[in-house]
Amino acid sequence: MSEYIEHDKDGVSVGLVEKKYFTFAEPPDDMLLEGNARLGPVTIAYETLGTLNTDRSNVVLILHALSGDSHVAGYYSEDDRKPGWWEIMVGPGKGIDTDKYFVICPNIIGSCMGSTGPSSINPASGEPYGFDFPVVTIGDMVKAQKALLDHLGIKQILSVVGGSIGGMQVLEWAVRYPDMVISAIPLASTTRHSALAIAFNEVARQAIMADPNWSKGKYYDSTKPNLGLALARMVGHVTYLSDEAMRRKFGRRLQNKSDFSFNFDADFQVESYLRYQGQKFVDRFDANSFLYITKAADYFDLRRQHGSGSEAEAFAKAKASFLVISFTSDWLYPTYQSKAMVKAMKKNNLDVSFCEIEADWGHDAFLLPNERLSALIKGFLDRNFNELQKK
């Protein structure tokens, strides 16, 4: 295989990548969490793409959404046919150009994709943490990422980029470590969940905890709560799409039949699709991690944690320039929430650009090919990098 793997019309792939690991907070120097619990040791899985320049000024930190991981682009092996989750955006000549920028993508703590989470071994018991794992917050995730960057010798980040829950981490980075962050790109995100978003997360959590195989989180040596997790994913997946996307993709078309079955089989294509998505999810994700990450997202409230109830005050410490992007059909984190954060940023005289992108595919639109999105991110990064070089 050549250095760059030919991929699609959007360009070539960054090629082969490697999942790396960093462990810190070894007892007795455990990591103090926002809930006052302690966690240690803590391992973070991460990937790096591109080359760090001599003055370390080209770092782009990419933060993933709920079920994402550190595998942001490229391939693990020559036989690997599945690239990273943002292959369309990250790579040579793409929106986030790995010929120019050094990309770091860590897996969040609480996850099951290599970083310490509920499925990790609890050193105190020698068994998986399960529900003994402490509740973590978006702030805790960012604090762990900061430890990773300290380990890598990174003192300045050209841009922090992320969508959805990744966007929450972007905002947390900007206000928690303002002297490190030159620019920030929160995509399809919010400063705090609405009641609707919390409600959907709670329905999904209850689906998992109602599964008799959940066993209060102690299922790792027995049958897993696959039914509950599949239902949780089905609920979540509906919120990631839009009415228009589902109309175009499915309508009321039947699944491989000419008439109703008059039973409870999957008559409609949309039913079959959701069942497939649920089943596929249980093969790669941990039910407890789903509980912990959705709870962290629900707890996130920038104005409560950093602004004494005021969104404008929450951004008072930030120094970064921002590119805030929303999507017209995103009803999970609708545009009015992005506009509210932009207004709060402007009250602090921050350099803010905002764009609402016309897209029919709902909340997941930031993960799909979009030339305008790629151009916006590329232009924003290049501008901030060029300005930094002049200083």
Image (tube, helix red, strand yellow):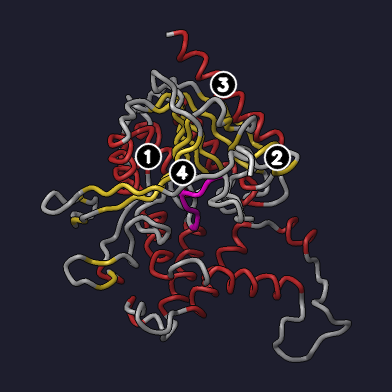
What percent of the width, then of the height, locates residue 143? 29, 43
* On screen, residue 232 above or below 82: below
Main SS, magenta region, reads loop
Q: Which residue is mark 3?
A: 382
Which quadrant of the figure has residue 353?
top right
Residue 145: in magenta span: no
Going by the numbered disc 3, the residue's amino acid type is Asp
| Lateral position of residue 356 relative to residue 167, left or right | right
Which secondary structure lies at badge 1? helix
Q: Nearer the viewer, mark 4 or mark 1?
A: 4
Which quadrant of the figure has residue 109?
bottom left
Mark 3 → mark 2, Cα distance in angstroms: 18 Å
What percent of the width, then of the height, locates residue 182? 42, 24
Q: Nearer the viewer, mark 3 or mark 1?
A: 3
> Dot 2: few (<14), some (14–19), or many (≥20) neighbours within 10 Å?
some
Report the quarter where the N terminus lies: top right
> Dot 4: few (<14), some (14–19), or many (≥20) neighbours within 10 Å?
many
Q: Nearer the viewer, mark 1 or mark 2?
A: 2
Going by the numbered disc 2, the residue's amino acid type is Asn
Q: Upstream in the sequence, badge 2 or badge 4?
A: 4
Q: Are marks 1 and 2 in contact (CB under 8 Å)?
A: no
> Dot 1: few (<14), some (14–19), or many (≥20) neighbours within 10 Å?
many
> Dot 3: few (<14), some (14–19), or many (≥20) neighbours within 10 Å?
some
Q: Are marks 4 and 3 in contact (CB under 8 Å)?
A: no
Q: Which residue is mark 4?
A: 63
Q: Residue at x 51, y 59 (%)?
A: 196
Residue at the extreme bottom? 263
Q: Residue at x 32, y 34 (%)?
A: 152
Q: Are marks 2 and 4 in contact (CB under 8 Å)?
A: no
Q: Which residue is mark 2?
A: 370
Q: Residue at x 61, y 57 (%)?
A: 240
